[in-house]
Each structure stands twice: as C-alpha cells, then as structure tokens.
Image: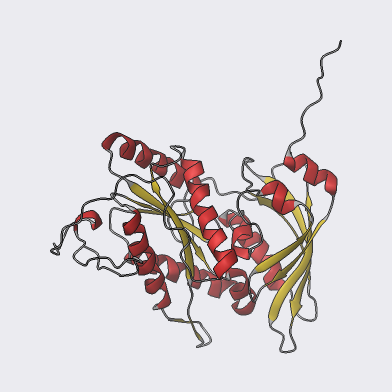
Amino acid sequence: MEANTAKKMEAIDLIRLYGLIDYQWDLRIDMIDWRGPINKLLSPETPLTLGSSFNNMLDTENFWLRLQALIQASPKSPQFSIRYHLSLPGYARCPVEDRGEVLYDGQGQAIGIRGSLKFLDEDADNTFRQNLSGYDPLTGFSEKEVVLETLTSHLEQSQQSGVPGAYLAVTIDRLTLFSCTYGLKATEVLIKEVTEAIRSAIRFNDFMGRTSGCCFGIILKDCDRWGIVRTSDRLISAVQQKKFVLEDGVEVSATISLGALVFPGESLEARKVMQRAERYLFEAQSIKGSNIAGTPYSMNTMPELKRPVENVQGKRRTRDAGLKLKENGASSVPLG
C-alpha cells in the first residue's frame, strides 16, 4: 500500500482557497463583522471582531501603510485599495490585498469601512515594507521581537528566583476612527502623547515596547496580581488625564485598555505569555467596550508578595504598598 503523502492544509491555505472575505467595520464602536471564516481559522482563541485586535496584527510599518490609504479616501472618493502584510499567530507574515470604501455620515465624518480581504501567496519579490531595526521610528521604543527577547529573559529570571513578574498588553482605543477623523499627523501626535503618559506612570526599571500598530507591551519586575490591578488603574488614569491640542486648536484626549497576567504561570514561552495577555485584553474589550482592564492575572499564579503596612518611599512596587487594598483592588498607589 502506498503511503499517504498528502500534506495537511494549514488554516492560511484554506483562507486562500476561500477567496475574498468581506467585512463591515463600525468605527464608532470599533467592531468588525466578518463574512467569512477568518476569525475561527486565524484567531480561534483570541477575538478578531475588534478594530484593535485587527490592528494588533499589523506591525508599525504596515499599520501606517493601511492608515494612509484610509485617510486618503473622502466622501467624494471613498474607495481604497492597498496591499500590506498581516502578522498572524503561528505564521510570520502574510500578504493581503484590502479593497473597499470608507463610509461617511451626513456631516462627512467617517463612521465605518466596508471592504474585503484577499489572502495572497507569499511575496517572492519582498516588495512590502518592513522595519528591520527592531525599534519603532516614531516613539523610539523596542518593537515586538525585542520585547519578546526581553520577556524571555525575565521569564527565566522569575523561574530561577521565585519572584513573580507581570506582562501587560495595552492598546489605544478606537485608533482607526481617530485617524480617519483627524488625519495621519494627529495620529502620530496621539501615539507619542499616549506613549509618554504610559512611560511616566511605570517604574524606571520596567520595560516597555511597541508591539504593533496600536498596542504596547510592558514587563513589570517583582509584581504579583495585585500589582497588576494597581498598575492598570494608574495607567488608565494617566492617559485619561492627558490632554493635547491639535494644530487646528482642537483639544482631544485618548483612552486605553489593558490585559495582563503574572508569570511564570501556565507557560515559560514568551510568545505564549504575550498572546495570553492580548487574549485577556481583547476578550474584555469585546464584552465591556473601551477603557477597561481585562482579566488581571492568569488562573495559575505564583504566591502573592508580602507588603508592609507602613509606606516606605523610594522602594519598588513590591515593597512600597502603604495603602491596604480594597477587595476589588481598585485603589491607586503612587510610584516609589
């Protein structure tokens, strides 16, 4: 009997065979309605029904490439056509062709996107843009691969020392709507301002990077599950309080959402830790909307760190908890 040499088809192969996958993106609530199997095939564990979860599949170069096409559309000429790369779970990069039109209300404000994705064969000519420096040109922070390398190191340290740490996935809410409303330059300003607000609200020795077009990754040293709750509260407040003025004098603000977990827990693999935190983030967003914190810790966490009753200035978060936590963990605490 001849051996069965048929190659098992991967999810991406099935999607290519499927053809065009239509979608309708409501920018006002940042929800995507897919007319095809993309959600189940590409992202079976993490919801892909949110604008932020889709933008998280774009590295910074391809994120800007797609935004430029959307911003160039207008009520008189709403159509767009663009090719870019998606970063897929389990696959390095996949070229797609995105065609459609931006939808506008009676005042000419963008309210949605109606389009279709076509998954292309591998780009043999490598014509798509890719930043190989490892650092985001806009913010100067590390991009995804450097964040993963750093997270791997922290996972090893926590495993050896027995002192837990935490990883936070942070996204800027409704970023595509903001871009279509105010333009590319204003979006750059918004991302810079949010970056600075987040950086100012974490400790000097915590690590922060920009992992995708709309998301940041933060690694907290010496942090248990209550440290995650406090940090989430502080970061959300820091961004909410940040106000900035655009070139035309319009004052705008932004909100963020978070998902996080304590490590080491279920996995010592950095990529799985990152994906789990992102899953918590997007699951919480899909249920509660924007400006929220997702499941603040994994189910399997290391023992909680001991915290003194008296406030001691100048120490790390695990030793500067001068305020007793309420049961819901919503109290904020100043940085040491």
Q: Residue at x 24, y 68 (%)?
A: 334
Quick one: quadrant of the C terminus? Answer: bottom left
Residue 241 in sight? yes
The quadrant holding residue 32 is bottom right
Find residue 76 and report its horizontal and vertical position in percent: 80, 81
In the image, taking residue 52 as reference, residue 329 lies left or right, namely left
Asked if residue 309 is positioned above or below residue 243 in the image, the reply reads above
Residue 211 in sight? no
Choose between 49 and 297: the one closer to the eye.
Answer: 297
In the image, taking residue 35 as reference, residue 57 lies left or right, namely left
Q: Residue at x 58, y 66 (%)?
A: 287
Find residue 3 and report its horizontal and vertical position in percent: 82, 14
In the image, taking residue 281 as reference, residue 208 lies left or right, namely left
Residue extending furthest front? 327
Choose between 137 and 63: the one closer to the eye.
Answer: 63
In the image, taking residue 168 as reference, residue 336 lies left or right, namely left
Asked if residue 320 is positioned above or below residue 179 in the image, the reply reads above
Residue extending furthest top? 1
Find residue 247 and report its horizontal and vertical position in percent: 51, 83
Q: How is the image coloured?
A: secondary structure
Find residue 171 and report its horizontal and vertical position in percent: 51, 63
Q: Residue at x 61, y 53 (%)?
A: 57
Quick one: quadrant of the N terminus? Answer: top right
**Tag count in the figure?**
0
Q: Residue at x 55, y 71 (%)?
A: 187
